[in-house]
Amino acid sequence: MARQPRGDFYPLPIVDQNTRPGAVTRLIVFIVVLTGAAIVFGIFRERLGDPFLLGMLGVLAMIGVGYLFATAIGFVQIAPRSTTDELSKAFVDSTPQGLVVTDTKGRVVYANKAYGDMTGASSAADIRTVENLLSDVPEASSVVYRIASGLRDGIAGDGEFRLSQAIRPGSEPGARWYRVGARAFNAPGQRQPLLAWQLDDISRERAEQERFFLDLQKAIDHLDHAPAGFFAADQEGRVTYINATLAEWLGIDLASFTPGAIALTEIVAGDGMALIRSVRADPGTTRNAVIDLDLETTTGEALPVRFMHRVSASRDGVAGPSRTIVLNRAEGEDASAALRASEVRFTRFFNSTPMAIAGVDLQGRIVRTNAPFLSLFASVVDRDAVDHKVRLDTVIHERDRQAFAAALEKARLRQADIAPIDTVLPNNEERHIRFYVNAVAEGTGGEGAEEAAIVYAVDTTEQKALEGQMAQSQKMQAVGQLAGGIAHDFNNVLTAIIMASDLLLTNHRPSDPSFPDIMNIKQNANRAASLVRQLLAFSRKQTLRPEVLNLTDVLADLRMLLARLVGNQIKLKVDHGRDLWPVKVDIGQFEQVVVNLAVNARDAMPEGGELTVRTKNVTAEEAKAYGYREMVAADYVLVEVEDDGTGIPPEVLKKIFEPFFTTKEVGKGTGLGLSMVYGIIKQTGGFIYCDSEVGRGTTFRIFLPRHVAEAAALAESQTPEPGDAAQGPAAPAAAAGKADAVRDLSGSATVLLVEDEDAVRMGGVRALTSRGYTVHEASSGVEALEIYAELEGKVDIVVSDVVMPEMDGPTLLGELRKLRPDIKFVFVSGYAEDAFAKNLPADAKFGFLPKPFSLKQLATVVKEVLEKD
């Protein structure tokens, strides 16, 4: 008798192909028994005879029939179901979701009663798979097809769809929502995986969602059309929600509004953000504040509003999102319109003034502030300080608090002569503040007035920096003028000494006892001339020969020299930037700059270390990021010389570029090295800065202007022909290049030598006369014009000093060109030719000879200028 299923615990499945799981096994055992009987019958047939075999056959037949009967009634089981199988089956059979299991060929293996009820199947013959049931329904076919396609690749899937009518025929009319899902799984005894489809009617769930959504829409609609504005912002100050009322006030189109796309800084006018940021909540709490400020509409108009602002903070103190109700202060009853307008104007003026304002009581405690005050002292004062009346002197450096107390006492006594107080912030001495303490006017308060004084504060950090920069610039300019003047006068002395030495050497042979002394005089004069050139470099009046260079090539050529200079204890690293822009510098002077900085770095690392020279391009935007005030934003090529030596103390760092300032021992430095570097870079049009920290090392940064090819081409197009003013400075270069060549420096031309220094003039006359020239001398430009007139213009060349009393050299050239436009002229000066050439006519022809010079150099320049066409 078959075992009855327990239908009282769960509904019977409409299809279950596994209700007799031992049928196949029992069939196999039965076949094995019959086969064994046949084998035994064949073996013992001939040995024992037919009667024995018939008896055995009967016994086996009775055993087989008994086994089959016992198996049929369940007494004998091959693989009995476990309790777990029963629980799993009970759960699946009783689940309210429809479940159908098929094999890979689409044959139904199992379907629970819920699936039959949902699809309208009353028997196993009526069961259809989900694919067969819904593949022809347009609303569901795409979802079912997608899930079925995924199952073929072993991927589970699910989806939802809406039908205009329920799947079960005869159901109540009306749309229904269904959720369908499917997955593959492996079952015991099955070679291929089975596919489980689950179908669920979620119409009631969707109805609840729609009802909740409608309620939410109504709530949002009420909030949107409330008579007050409302917005929410995240911890970064980005607006995540704004209601329609506030959007209309500000002119924001809600249809295009994206949460987080608008920042509070975009809609808050003036310094209102300082008031908002000053409201901070304690960790794990929320805080409310009332703030009067202006919002800015999309048309740029100011909208006076009142914030009912609420902020929160996590337990860790991290600021959370904020919620704010916004009241329009421009609206209200007509009776109070004038008062309200007056209040709005006062709030606007109070918060929009560029000065920070605070009212303090008799004890110096803050009673109220404006937005710029909170913005200026954001690191010291917040809303809590105002609410809890924190003393104002907490924002004043300790050394100036006594002066503030005295000013406050004068204000209390209503005295007018209250001097301003210059101080710095206690936590940042780089921020300079000037305070003005004013007494409250008579009649505005009385005995019970809160404010005892009004304090105004102005940030003077920029002003102090400019004052310091101006003072430093004026000092460097004054020292530069002094150094240039000394160099000019000293050049005249050295020129006379060198020329006199040359004249003596012409009359003394090397075997003469006086010859070594004369050579010693000349050598020391040349050494002094080197010091003068350094002074001229600092005063930016030296002669430069700028050319367009690629610093990568320059530093590569200089590397071996630098390695020898710094020694073996110091590791030299040269980091070349990629695709460096060209620069226009004097290669010799630039090499001198790098060498000088490398030597200083070596001296700062007596125990060894690492010296790094790196280059890179710096755009105008990147130049701003360095924060150097006087540097103009432009494209530069940056050269950094960095060491990890002892560093430079701050008090020394301020003076390193001053001439004759040195920290080295006596006899080991002149103090002109860095001043020369400073002057060369400045004269080139660049900037040099030094950043150093004691014990960490020093970095010199040189910013050289980028040379633009277009500008170079334009300059070349405007360059006069060879022999004119622009080519004049090339004369000493030519003289220097041919100084060692054996050539005839004699001549028979008439020379007018103009020099106010008697010793230099006399030496020049003797030098040129000894070369065969006819020389006429003058001590000033006026005297030179008189001699030129006496000679009736029969002068082949004029050699003149630049700086002279009564009439200087450039003025003399201008007067002579009126008489003779093609006059040949040589300027002699201790300054660079750039110092005076810019004041000359563009077509003026001249040569240039820098002081100090030798007799041979003077003769060479005169000869070359005369030979030019």
Image (cartoon, rainbow, N blue to C red):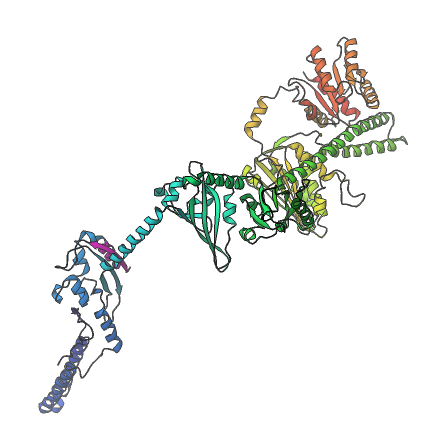
Quarter of the figure that contains the N terminus: bottom left
In the image, is 379 to the left or to the right of 116?
Answer: right
Residue 186's spot in the image, x, y percent? 26, 67
Q: Quadrant of the C terminus?
A: top right
Direction from residue 730 to residue 166 in the image, left or right? left
In this figure, what is the number of numbered marks? 0
Q: Locate residue 483 relative to residue 150 in the image: left or right.
A: right
Looking at the picture, does residue 581 appear above or below residue 849?
below
Percent position of residue 673, x then y: 73, 39
Residue shown at the point (51%, 40%) measured from the top left: 346
Q: Is residue 758 above or below residue 536?
A: above
Q: Residue at x 64, y 30 (%)?
A: 546
Q: Is residue 573 visible?
A: yes
- Tell me where residue 333 sits by quadrant: top left
Image coordinates of residue 801 in percent, x first then y, are 76, 21
Residue 536 image point, x, y percent: 73, 32
Q: Nearer the viewer, residue 726 or 12?
A: 12
Q: Residue furthest right?
A: 513
Q: Within the magenta stretch, is there residue 160?
A: yes
**In the image, is residue 222 above or below residue 635?**
below
What span is colored magenta in the figure? 143-164
Residue 625 within the magenta-colored segment of the rendering: no
The answer to whether residue 747 is seen in the rendering is no
- Between residues 812 and 414, which one lies in front from this camera angle? 414
Quarter-wise, where is residue 735 in the image? top right
